[in-house]
Image (tube, grey):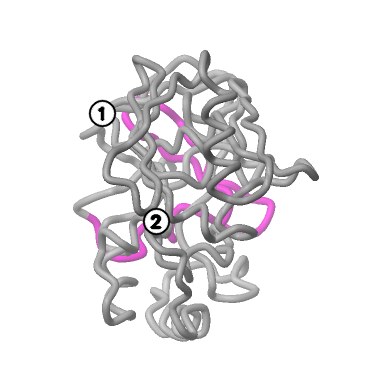
Amino acid sequence: MLYPIKSLDGIEVEKATILDSGALQYDREFAFVDAQNRFVNGKRYPQILMLRSQFFLEQRLIKMKFPGEKSAQAFHLDEERPALTAVVSDFLGFPVQLQQNTTMGFPDDTDSPGATVISTASLTEVASWFPGINVDEMRRRMRANIEIDGVPAFWEDGLFAASGETVTFKVGNVQFLAINPCQRCVVPTRDSYTGEAYPNFQKIFGQNRQATMPKWVNTAQFNHFYRLSVNTRVSVTEAGKMITLGSSIEICQ
C-alpha cells in the first residue's frame, strides 16, 4: 500500500520503487499542513478521516469526495494544487497548504523511513479483539506498506532485536533492515471513515497484545504494548530496486 497524501486513503499497487532515502516512491509524498506548519493528520484533526480519495499515480490525479457530496472532484497533483488546497481548507474550516517531498515523503519516523511491515494474520487477530471492526478496517487504521500473507499472527515480531540492533530481511531482491516495533498513535483508535473514537481501544489493544505476545519475541523494545508492525531502513545500495506483489520474504542470517 502507498499513501500518496499523508492521512488520506491508500492505494494498492503491484510494485513500488525504493528511493535513495529508503522510502517508497510516492508514499506520503504530499502532506497538508496548517498555518503553524503542522501536519493536518488524523491525530490533530480527525475530520480529515472523513475525506475519501482515489489516486491515479501515472496521471498524477486525485479524486476527492467530501461528506454529503454525491460525486468526487478531480485535481491534478502538480497543476491544480491551489484549487485542491482551497476545497480542503473550506471543508476543514481553516487554511491549509499542500507540501511535497519527493526525496523521503513525510514519514512519522524520519530516522527509519523505509516501508512498514505487517502480516495479514496479525491484522486478522487484532481485529478480533474489537467487536464491530473487521480486518479491512483494521488494515485501514494501521496503514502499513507491506503486508505478508501465509505466516502466523505476529510473525513480523521476529524481524527486530534489541534496541540499537537490526535484523536483515529481503523482500524479493531488496534488502531491508528491521528497526523496531512501531509505536502506534491515536489514529488507530479512530474509525477510518468517520474519525469516531472506539471506546478504550488503546487499553484493550495493550492487554490483548501482551496476552498474545509469542514467547520467542524479544520484548526489550516493548516499553508498552501499544505497538504493531515493524519500522525499517533501507541502505542506499538498494535505491532504484523494486518490490513487487507476490515476492518472497526471507530473514537473512
Q: Point out which mark residue 14 bears.
A: 1
What residue is rendered at 24% in x and 56% in y? 151
What residue is rendered at 43% in x and 55% in y? 50
Residue 54 is left or right of residue 98, and the answer is left
What residue is rendered at 59% in x and 71% in y? 222
Q: Amino acid at mark 1?
A: Glu
- The x, y position of residue 108, in whole percent, is 62, 47
Indicate the quadrant where residue 229 lies.
bottom left
Disc 1 vs disc 2: which is toward the camera? 1
- The x, y position of residue 60, in whole percent, is 41, 18
Q: Nearer the viewer, residue 249 or 204?
A: 204
Specify the quadrant that holds the C terminus. top left
139 inside magenta stretch: no
Instruction: Look at the picture and state if 173 lies above or below 224.
Output: above
Q: Amino acid at mark 2?
A: Glu
Q: Secondary structure at mark 2?
A: helix
Q: Nearer the viewer, residue 225 or 95?
A: 95
In space, the residues marked 1 and 2 are separated at their CA atoms by: 21 Å
Looking at the image, the residue that sits furthest to the right is 36
Q: Nearer the viewer, residue 189 or 232?
A: 189
- The x, y position of residue 121, in whole percent, is 26, 62
Indicate the quadrant where residue 29 lies.
top right
What residue is rendered at 47% in x and 79% in y? 201
Q: Point out which mark residue 237 bears.
A: none
Instruction: Look at the picture and state if 252 lies above or below 46.
Output: above
Q: Secondary structure at mark 1?
A: loop
Residue 211 is left or right of residue 136, and the answer is right
* Region rendered in magenta: 151-180
Instruction: Look at the picture and state if 75 lies above or below 154.
Output: above
- The x, y position of residue 171, in whole percent, is 35, 34
The residue wearing badge 2 is 156
